[in-house]
Amino acid sequence: MSDNVRDIESLIVQGESSSVEFKLSVPLGNAIAANLSAFANSSGGVLIVGVDDKGDVVGLATAEANQAIAELRRVASSLLPYPVEVRGATVNGKIVVYAAIDPVPNHLRPVITADGRIYIRQGSTSRQLNKREEQAMLRGTDFAPRPTDRRCRAFVAMSFRTEEEPVLIDYLQAMKRGCARLSLPIDLVIINNVEGDYEISQEIMNQIDECDILIADFTLSPRNVYFELGYARGKNKLIIQTARHGTVLEFDVRNWRTAFYRNATELEERIGPALETAYARFTGQG
């Protein structure tokens, strides 16, 4: 057994950390770039593909491993200013692929992804810097990392008339995906998922009382969302307004910034930055 394999086995046993990230399969190009650049902009690290979040070695088929190696090498060569070790290894009889990333020299920092984003490693996650942090890093000055131990609750106010508009389910799932991509401690709260015996209007107000952010989606112009938005504004909650293109907003909300989207994919892309901005304000960093 080579020393490299022993090292990879040891890293897997230790679990995810500021210098180790597990993936079940090779991520899409942008996600690879985010992880690799985060390690490079921090203290370096190893991305291991073929291992789940719990540290269980699932492994890759030979063809998958070859594809993962090729994709990791392609992204690394276009993103980073130095060679990156990308190899396969057999752990517990299963194939995994790893990329070992060195920290980038100070004079070459920061590594910026093709879509103009800057990532760092914080705890066991890779996260995008906000504008203030980006400016500080580009100036070569220190910045205070955004805390990631403060959990934030975001209540989703939207229409659930799926019998009238089945695509509403896709919109809700898009919000969940957009939130999950941030790797921030934000819990989305949906009233339909709240267990117990309660009067729904009162429980909605209780949930809004406990939340930090309200996402108000006006697709189908649901009356409940207008009520919940007004209640949340009265409680000085952070607000994110969204709506499908073509939705006519009433006069008392149309002057507030609203993220319009054409489909679930566009909603997923827009909700992430909106939540990140709201979280920064929640933690006092924005």
Image: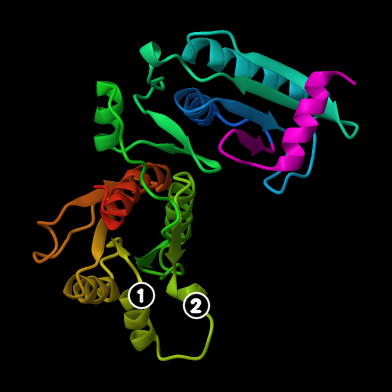
In-front residue for pair 80/165: 80
Q: Residue at x 14, y 63 (%)?
A: 253
Residue 49, picture quadrant = top right
Q: Which residue is mark 2?
A: 194
Dots 1 and 2: beta carbons under 8 Å?
no
What range of the chain is rendered magenta? 1-24
Q: Is residue 73 above or below residue 280?
A: above
Q: How many numbered badges does the structure rendering display?
A: 2
Q: Residues within 10 Å of mark 1 (few under 14, many from 20)?
A: some
Name the secondary structure under disc 1.
Answer: helix
Q: Residue at x 38, y 84 (%)?
A: 203
Amino acid type at image mark 2: Val
Q: Position of residue 58 (x, y in %)?
A: 79, 40
Q: Residue furthest front?
A: 142
Query: What residue does disc 1 label?
Result: 210
| Residue at the spot 47% in from the left edge and 44% down from the top edge | 181
Q: Is residue 254 left or right of residue 100?
A: left
User: Residue 232, position in %: x, y?
Assistant: 24, 72
Image colouring: rainbow
The Cα atoms of the two marked residues, 1 and 2, are separated by: 13 Å
* Residue 143 visible (yes or no): yes
Task: Determine the image quadrant of residue 45.
Answer: top right
- Give the answer, above or below, for where 163 lies relative to 180: below
Q: Position of residue 261 (x, y in %)?
A: 31, 46
What is the secondary structure assignment of the residue under circle 2?
A: loop
| Quarter of the figure with the N terminus | top right
